[in-house]
Amino acid sequence: MIKLKEINRIINGKLNGDPDYLIHSVNSISKANQKEISFAVKDSIKLEKVIAGALIVKEDSHITYSNLIYVKEPYLAFAKLLEYFFPHKRFNKTISKNAYISKTAHIGKGVTIGAFSYIGDNTTIGYNTEIHSGVKIYKNVKIGKNCIIYSNVVIREDIEIGNDVTIQPGAVIGADGFGFTRLSNGQPVKIPQKGKVIIGNNCEIGANTCIDRSTIEETILNDYVKLDNLIQIGHNTKIGKSTAISALSGISGSVDIGENVIMGGQVGIADHIKIADGVMIAAKCGVSGNIKNKSIIAGIPHQEITKWRKSFVIYRNIEKYIEKIKILENRIKELEEK
Amino acid sequence: MIKLKEINRIINGKLNGDPDYLIHSVNSISKANQKEISFAVKDSIKLEKVIAGALIVKEDSHITYSNLIYVKEPYLAFAKLLEYFFPHKRFNKTISKNAYISKTAHIGKGVTIGAFSYIGDNTTIGYNTEIHSGVKIYKNVKIGKNCIIYSNVVIREDIEIGNDVTIQPGAVIGADGFGFTRLSNGQPVKIPQKGKVIIGNNCEIGANTCIDRSTIEETILNDYVKLDNLIQIGHNTKIGKSTAISALSGISGSVDIGENVIMGGQVGIADHIKIADGVMIAAKCGVSGNIKNKSIIAGIPHQEITKWRKSFVIYRNIEKYIEKIKILENRIKELEEK
Amino acid sequence: MIKLKEINRIINGKLNGDPDYLIHSVNSISKANQKEISFAVKDSIKLEKVIAGALIVKEDSHITYSNLIYVKEPYLAFAKLLEYFFPHKRFNKTISKNAYISKTAHIGKGVTIGAFSYIGDNTTIGYNTEIHSGVKIYKNVKIGKNCIIYSNVVIREDIEIGNDVTIQPGAVIGADGFGFTRLSNGQPVKIPQKGKVIIGNNCEIGANTCIDRSTIEETILNDYVKLDNLIQIGHNTKIGKSTAISALSGISGSVDIGENVIMGGQVGIADHIKIADGVMIAAKCGVSGNIKNKSIIAGIPHQEITKWRKSFVIYRNIEKYIEKIKILENRIKELEEK
């Protein structure tokens, strides 16, 4: 229970309404009751059925409502209130008797290690990091402070992970890159994968996502990289700061992705491709060449999105154009016969 | 070993053959021996090499064979006989000494819990449910009766699962939805995911499939939803009764899918899309808008399938049409010169 | 530390340089220092900044450098040297006290079994095989010798795995195939999956990849099959010797893939398709029919790649052609008016 004026202070807004109104929780606009606060990003939202106790709106909003808080970034305010009302309850900072921890591992203060987790030789776990149950961490791994590693994550040997990193359940960090050469008879021979994976600070890795170790150099995720579930990151690939990739995307080996790149789901990027900062890639796009400038691309293979859209609109109506060609043919025939 | 007349009773068929013929097992038509029963869905099947002891056929079949059982739905009969000859051998209904079970967990009668599984605080496991080894179930989870949860599944906090649900190995239920907002400098800020996942009765979740928890409301799978392996279900998405989705498909957030929808593999659906009951979506389709009526769709972006097919047939032959344009151009030039 | 002449012997090359030059390690060409050996596959590589102690090149290379070793297959030589300088350090050949091993399991000599792993009844683990921590192996499984099974892999009942097989973390072998029939009201009924998976010798299975068990026969991977991460192999599918499949590809049920087939990432293959030996399938391709001859295919649905490329070049410029049609139309109109 918190007064509106205090919420206003937390989200750094401008309050228009009753400062002493009591708020019990935060909820979606269709479900919020009179004791809950919600948010409305667009002015076009229909308010007839809304009974929320207060609404967070954009600073230039024209919405009329009993209690309003104006903010620059409503989603950010929403994120803050979610964290306020539903704080992440940290685990108990104890180390389970049912975990296996190597005698040569370095476990920081405030660390939680869950049951049936395995910590290998010379591995370091930083201050306050939570390792949930069933996590398997091989030897010579370095994990920073304040990380949350959910159940059944596997981290192979020699991996480096920064601070404030979250890894969702089932992710695999550092499996062998997919590198083979073939004998003259076609038989594949594995190229040993002896490199590592380096993950920066504040990264998030989705459930069952896989980040492969490189042959000899490093696969690198810079700070604030956000990966959704079921993503494949190939060996030796670098991903720039604050880049976000949606589910089921596959990044091949030795790809170099810039900062602030945003990818939809099921995107594929061929190996050794370079993607500039700020590029946006539509879902399902297949990127087969370097993208040199900040741009939006789509299609298989990729095209600049306005070009892609024009081509597709024609494609959708291609029958009509073929019909037209037939008509022209007849008209020419008639002319020729004259 | 069972007599044909008894099999006939189990599958509710009409027997044409020796009612006392002894059957030892069920097998595929190419491998079934004289002591085994098999099934033939189509009349066009070649019978020269078939030596099966009996065949199950559709009630209107014209196949001639020594022992035949006519049924309405041969696949259903086949499913029943597979279960009859190879029953699911339930685990031993014991709770492993090597499992961790919170003192505040509620474990029903007849429950099996395998080695190295973890059951969190206040979690409820219903009557007769099997939890295999290495399963990690967080706190406040409710699981119904007669479920089978295979090894290394992870179920996060506050999830609700109905009765008769099967979850294949490695699936992750309730990982954080992929929700971020960005500061003006582009830096992503996580929107906390405090909602839950609700799974109805008789659902099946494939191996390594991920179903994300929502920001604040619920991600919902209704009864009889069937998900293949390696599928991504985004936060806040609802899936209607009896809908089936094939492997590697990705459903974004806040999608609303109707009942009896069928999707091929590697389908992608954009966020906030609504799909009507009974829609069929071809493999690899990219759905970028609402599908309002029962229909079959294909392509990226999606089109009604007959339209998609016509466009594609033209596309395959596009060279010919371009050639035609060139010829027309020349003929016009000639006419103009006259 | 090893002399160049000894390296030359290991990789069976022809040395041009100082046979007694000392090499400490192997590295990529951009990072190798004067004590390291690297390799240069193409003559076009720029050597100004290269300071490697020696280079491995193709036998017909024209590169000029202080120390060169000529070999037939530089990648193969590279693989050998990686293994020489960074040998796979086998685990300690001990069986963890924290593992659960059925009394009826057969554990060969030299086997390693990690903490929190589960070995079911009547399961056999062959000589020298490494089972890392958290691996769950159900009953009646046969695993050959010299295999490496990484953490949190799940292998269900009745699976057969050959010798020298590597399975990366989180892979699931033998989950139920996705087989359902529907009652007349649309309700799906599971077809029990009672078959098995057979994996040959020298196969590699990627992280979080899933290989489903068949309904009644077998899903088969022949020797030297190489699967990347996050791949779906459907029930009853056969994959021929030395075939390699890249990440996020989905092979439906009852597919028959030949030998030495190579697939890019995110490929999809419809059910019951037959693919000939030596076929190459471009990334993201959707294969909807049999591929009878050795060929290269691309597109959704697939086309022979040269045809696919021609069509796509036209598609990219389709606007121009539509413009052309409009111009022709006007010219005909003018002619007609004369």
Image (cartoon, coloured by chain):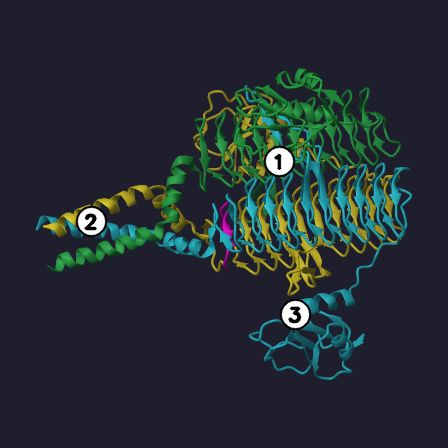
Chain colours: A yellow, B green, C cyan
B177 relative to B91, above or below: below
Numbered label attached to residue B127 = none
Give me the residue at 50% from left, 25% from top. B277
**Closer-to-camera residue (C211/B236):** C211
Quarter occupied by the N terminus of chain C: bottom right
Q: Is residue A15 visible?
A: no
- Which of the 4 quarters of the picture holds residue B156? top right
- Direction from residue B33 to residue C88 in the image, left or right: right
**Residue corresponding to mark 3:** C73
Same subunit, tags 1 and 2: no
Q: Is residue C157 visible?
A: yes
- Which of the 4 quarters of the picture holds residue B9? top right
Q: Amino acid at mark 1?
A: Lys
**Residue corresponding to mark 2:** C329
Q: Looking at the image, how many numbered discs can be counted on the residues?
A: 3
**Residue corresponding to mark 1:** B49
- Direction from residue C266 to residue C160 in the image, left or right: right
**Closer-to-camera residue (A100/B122):** A100
Same subunit, tags 3 and 2: yes
First to last magenta residue range: A278-290
